[in-house]
Image: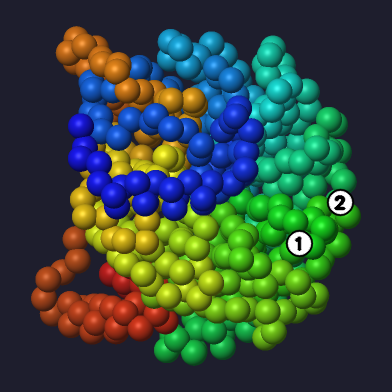
Amino acid sequence: MPRITKHTFATFFILLAFQPARGDLEHWNQFRGPNGDGVSTAKALPIEFDEAKNVRWKAAIPGEGWSSPVVWGNEVWLTAGSQTKKELRAMCVDIASGKIVKDIKVFDMIERKVDPAYVHDSPHLNSVATPTSVVEEDYVFVSFGSQGLACLNRKTGDKVWERRDLRIFQPVRQGSSPIVDNKNLYVAFDGTDQQFFVALDKKTGDTRWKMDRNVSTDWGATLRARGLQPRKGGGGKPGDNKKSFATAHIINVNGQRQLIAPAGEATISYNPDTGEEFWRALHPGGFNVAARPLYAHGMVYVFTSGLTNYLIGIRPNGSGNVTDTHIAWSTTRGTPSIPSPILLGDLMFTVTDSGGIVRCLDPRTGDEIWRKRINGNHWASPIYANGKLYFSSKEGDVAVLKAGREMPESVVKSRMNASFIASPAVAGASLILRSTTHLYCLQEGFERTGQQVAADVYPKATVAKKEAVKSNGPDAERLAALGSKLKAMVKSGKLSREIATELYQSAAGNTK
């Protein structure tokens, strides 16, 4: 049993004040939970576990998919797909048993739209089922990006409506998850060829409104400002700065609802009822947005990737182009490009997708309070419950830290035979983790037997082969010089690590 100190009680009462007012019943019904912020009211989630300890059950999930699990009552819903069978499915798993009780074929795959001019097409960097579903009392809304959206009857699994006409070219597939209110379903389509945002009638799937993103920046000037020379034809990646993967967020500002929807190189606020644009803030070079925006302290917080990893605080009370007037602060120091943040009162917690550096920030200013390395590569967004932060990595580690203004002295780290890309969900006292192969239900007091652990079956890994780069000669010297330049640009905040890696690999001939 951990030793209880005065500091422990002080931390508990401080964090209790951070908890937003919520009902006792909490359905983890959408990406990042009931409020879309990764914060749970659960009090008894397990802190330490392995493949046997504190595991209620572990279920193999057929197909592939990175969509996060969502929970309604005793049901866990998730999506998956099969490239071999060319089909896309939605599954419902019983929380008590771990059994798949519904396995619904939603769509047969249609031929993926491509752009011959985009020679670096890389769908393998994403899954066929990445957008997270939304579940409600009567319906489940599932999205497979350009492959289609559908509304399912939650109790029967029957398809209520579908839309397969909303198609774009997304070279890394789509990741934007749908969100809903009492009338509409909202989702972004930000490809390299088209960028638009739509609101669909929840009951019928009919289009309520559709808005062209209409984001135009001087891409050549953005590249030159970072010491990069624009390449003819976009360097085989035309329109790359137009793409985005972010999930929208509905907020309330002085009694007016706003739908905050990051796009490539701009964050836009819409009237969710009409599609009217309230304001937009440009962030040139900051595209590939994946993190879900948050709202607190009179500011909308947006994380970008692309050329530059920005963290921006935007005051949402303006109109028109507010880039020069309503950006309260921005920083490029140690900001993540994929995992979303946790915001607790006057503390913000982030983790870098590369290297696993956890940072505690003051959300009013962006100033760093503390940082701690937990290692690993983090694409999954963290969650918060009962005074603790949970971080799950692609290497299969789940790190648990105390959430507070003081840097935690220790990290509880559990290693699973897994790779976590989907973000966790919470169901009562259970922590639901989806790996690339299995679904875990972790709960205190349960344990799997040695026979159960030994019976786990994993699909064979596919290893991509790349040509080796010559280790000497002019090419090696050129690549070494380029590597040094790119490292300096990353360190100064002019370039994101992801784009620097991509540029280096492209120069080395490793484009796939």
| Residue 253: image location, x then y, percent | 76, 62
Say which element carries label 1.
strand
Residue 85 image point, x, y percent = 50, 24
Is residue 73 in view? yes
Residue drawn at x 25%, y 46% is 5
Vertically, is 275 above or below 304? above
| In the displayed structure image, the side of residue 211 where residue 433 appears, left or right | left
* Kind of residue sitting beneath label 2: Asp
Residue in the image at 53% along x and 11% along y: 101
Task: Choose between 307 and 146: the one closer to the eye.
Answer: 307
Residue pointed to by mark 2: 273
Identity of the residue drawn at 79% across and 56% down: 257
Alpha carbon of mark 1 to alpha carbon of mark 2: how far?
15 Å
Residue projecting furthest to the left: 472
- Which numbered disc, 1 or 2, marks the residue that appears first in the sequence? 1
Residue 480 sits in which quadrant?
bottom left
Q: Residue furthest front?
A: 6
Q: Position of residue 466 (x, y in %)?
A: 26, 54
Front one among 409 and 193: 409
Q: Nearer the viewer, residue 171 or 28?
A: 28
Across and down, in percent, residue 327 comes to: 62, 78
Circle 2 residues within 10 Å: few <14, some 14–19, many ≥20: some
Q: In the image, which is nearer the foreground, mark 1 or mark 2?
A: 1
Tag 1: residue type? Val
- Dot 2 falls on a residue whose secondary structure is loop
For disc 1, the marked residue is 253
